[in-house]
Image (cartoon, rainbow, N blue to C red):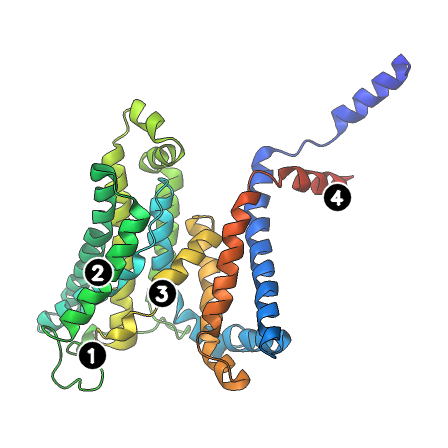
Amino acid sequence: MTNADDTSAATVSHRRPVIPAWMIGRLEAIAIPLFALVAGALLFSLFLMTQGQSPAEFFSLVWKAGFSSAFSWKNTLSRVSPLLMAALCVAIPARLGLMIIGGEGAIVLGGLAAAVTGVFVADLPSLFGFAAMVAAACIVGGIWIGAVGALRILRGVNETIASLLMAYIATSLFNQLVESVFRDPSSLNKPATYPLPEWLRIGNIPFLDAHWGVAVGILACLACYFLIERTTIGFAARVTGDNIRAAQVQGFPVARLVIGFTALGGALAGLGGFFEVSAIYGSANDSLISGVGNTGILIAFLARHNPLAIIPMAMLLGGFEASSGLVQRRMDLPDATILVFEGCIFVVVLLSETLYGRSDSLIRKMLERGRN
C-alpha cells in the first residue's frame, strides 16, 4: 500500500464517528429489557398453544383491558401505586448491591398498621389522622426491611434469604393479628380489621379517576432518582454497591447506608400498604396478600433498578394484571394465567442479565451502519 493510501485510510478512520460508551450503555439498558419482554411473550405464546389457545387473542384482550380506553387505564392505574412502591423496595437497596425480595411483608404489615392506627385516631381531624396512618405504615415497613439490612451488615446474614423468610413471617403475623386481636366481629366470612371512617379514605385525583397513591408513587420514584443520582449520599451508595471494600477505605458509613437504604425501601413498601387500605379496601384483610411484592421484583429488574424506568414498567405490568379478569372470562383460562405470563418474562429477564456488557459490539456496529 502506498503512502497516499495509508493517509486516505487514516483519514477515513479518523472521520468515522466514535460512539461514546455512555450511549452504548443507555441503549443496552433499553434494548435488553425490551428483548426480554418480547422473548418472554414468545415463550408464553408457546405455552398458550400447548393449551390450545390463541396467543393473538390473549394479547388482544390484554391490550383491550389494560390500555385501549380511559376505562382500561383506570383499571391499570388502580394497580400501579403498590407496584411502584414494591419495585422501589427492591431497587433502592439494589444500588448498594443488596437483593431484597421480601417487600410483600412490608406492604401487608404497613397496611395493617395504617388500618389499626386509623381506627384509633378516628376522632382526630382528617389531616392528623392521615399523618398518623402514613407514619405508622412507613415506620413498620421501614423497621421490617431495615432489620434485614441490619442482619446483613451486622451479622453477615444473606439478605435475599432473610427478606424472603421475613415476608413469610409477616404474612403469618398479619393473618394471626387480623383473625384475633384486631378483628372486626362483624366480618364473618372474611376476617378484617374495623373499617376506616370515610374521612380517612383516600379519594381520586381530579379528572384522572385514579387515587392519589399513583401520584405519590410517581413522586417517590422521582425523589429516589434524585437521591441516588444527584446527592452525596447516593454517590456513597453507588460506590458501596460497586465495591464495598473501596467504600470502606474511603471512609463511607457503609453500615448506616445499608440499614438506611433498606429501611427506606421498606418504608415506601409500607406506604404502598397504606394506600391499598385507605384507597382500595377500607380495612386490612387478606386481599392485601396479593403477590404485589413479587411483581415488584420483576418491575425492578426490567427497570434495571432505575427509579425513573420503574414508572413505565409499573404501568405496563399494571395493565397486564388489570386484564386477568377479562382473559379469564373470554378465554376460559385460570386467573393465574397472567402470573404464568409474568413468570415467563422474569425467566427471560434473569437469563438476559448475561447479555449486559457483551452486546455493546453489536449495538456499536448497528449504530455505525445507521450513520454510514
Q: Looking at the image, which is closer to me, 289 or 132?
A: 289
- How much space separates mark 3 and mark 2, taking CA atoms? 16 Å
Which residue position holds label 4?
370
Q: Nearer the viewer, mark 4 or mark 3?
A: 3
- Across and down, in percent, residue 73 comes to 47, 73
Vertical placement of residue 200 versus 228, above or below: below
Residue at numbered disc 3? 292
Question: Any mark on residue 198, and which?
Answer: 1
In percent of the image, x 62 and y 38: which residue is there?
A: 360
Residue situated in front as seen by the camera: 69 or 257: 257
In the rendered image, residue 330, in percent from the top left (x then y), is placed at: 53, 85
Separation of residues labelled 2 and 4 (CA atoms): 54 Å
Q: Earlier in the sequence, mark 1 or mark 3?
A: 1
Label 3 secondary element: helix
Where disc 2 sits, the SS reads: helix
Q: Is residue 213 above or below residue 51?
A: above
